[in-house]
Image (cartoon, rainbow, N blue to C red):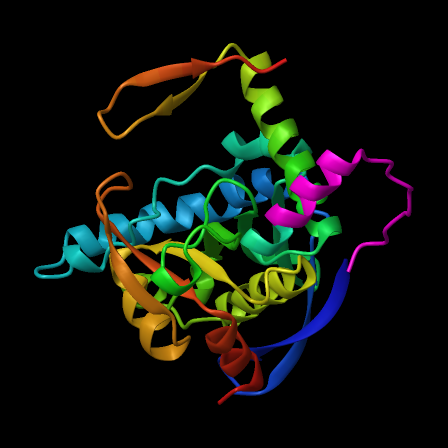
Amino acid sequence: MREVVPIIDNASGELVDAEIFDEVTLTHFIETQAEWRPIVLAAARALSQKPNQGMLIPRHFHWDWTRKEAALKLLAVRFYGIAFEGRLQGIMKVETVAHTCRLPEQQGKPLVYIDYIEVAPWNIKVLMTAMGQPQRFRAVGTRLFEAAVQQSLEEDFRGRLGLHSLPGSEGFYINECGMTPVGRDPHKENLLWCEFTPEQAERYLSGE
Amino acid sequence: MNPKRTMTLNLTDQEMSVLDELSVQKDLSKTALIRQALRLYQMVDARISRGEKLFFEDQAKQKAELMVL
């Protein structure tokens, strides 16, 4: 799968053509470690040294995508990447068998589970602000999220989708995406489990 | 969407009836259900091949190891 999708150039506010694909390889994982991680860590360090900014440090600062190499071979796992002019701007890992729906009206039914989603540090406003630089692109995470909803439809899961939200992203998933906050999960660092029903997924894709 | 290939699957009446039942229960087409089963089998097999074990836990927190062939 390889499609052109629009993302927003933050400097001009204009839409630009990026490419979303699911042929993710170890090379992409290495790219995140080599190009993203040093910036994420430097920004996290800068935030930690500023008064009252420590809570802005993204919880994903320690992620290492290269450790997910074994999952590249699994049918139940799919990775998506977004690139602009050949440079990776975002990456996502989804699973289709390890989790099922928790909302009472769809309990036990299959869903697409977003296991990890990360955008390049230069596309995260809080990190770039800490580094004294402008954010490069917007809507990268949104395009990845849409791909997960689309996969749920293709899988015959009718748009059902679930994820454990990091604390800093709860507002995005609940208010902007319209997901239902189901509850904290004591088995997953007490993160908030959020879920889409088919109706919510349809509303989300139609832009209502 | 990635390209797909077609195959014929021969099932006994009993197997087909389980497939029908699970399809309704999970709100999935039979094709999607078989695809899910294959994914699950591969994931479990990969982890067991790495030396991991698969356990089920009942409501009393008793664990039972599941042997997968």
Is B11 inside the magenta-drawn segment? yes
Q: Can residue A39 be seen in this snapshot?
A: yes
| A141 or A123: nearer the viewer | A141
At a point 35% along the width and 48% down the height, the residue shown is A60
Q: Residue furthest front?
A: B13
At a point 59% along the width and 13% down the height, the residue shown is B49
Relative to A183, A125 lies left or right? right
Q: Quadrant of residue A27?
A: top right
In the rendered image, residue A67, in percent from the top left (x then y), is placed at: 50, 30
Is B68 inside the magenta-drawn segment? no
Relative to A206, A60 lies left or right? left
Relative to B42, B12 lies left or right? right
Q: Can residue A26 be seen in this snapshot?
A: no
Q: How many marks?
A: 0
Q: Quadrant of residue A84?
A: bottom right
At a point 49% along the width and 77% down the height, the residue shown is A199
Q: Residue furthest top?
A: B51
Q: Quadrant of residue A189?
A: top left
In the rendered image, residue A179, in percent from the top left (x then y), is placed at: 38, 70
Position of the N terminus of chain A by quadrant = bottom right
In the rendered image, residue A91, in percent from the top left (x then y), is placed at: 55, 53
| A11 or B40: nearer the viewer | B40
In the rendered image, residue A116, in percent from the top left (x then y), is placed at: 46, 49
Magenta segment boundaries in residue numbering:
B1-22
Relative to A62, A109 lies left or right? right
| B66 or A29: nearer the viewer | B66
At a point 22% along the width and 60% down the height, the residue shown is A56
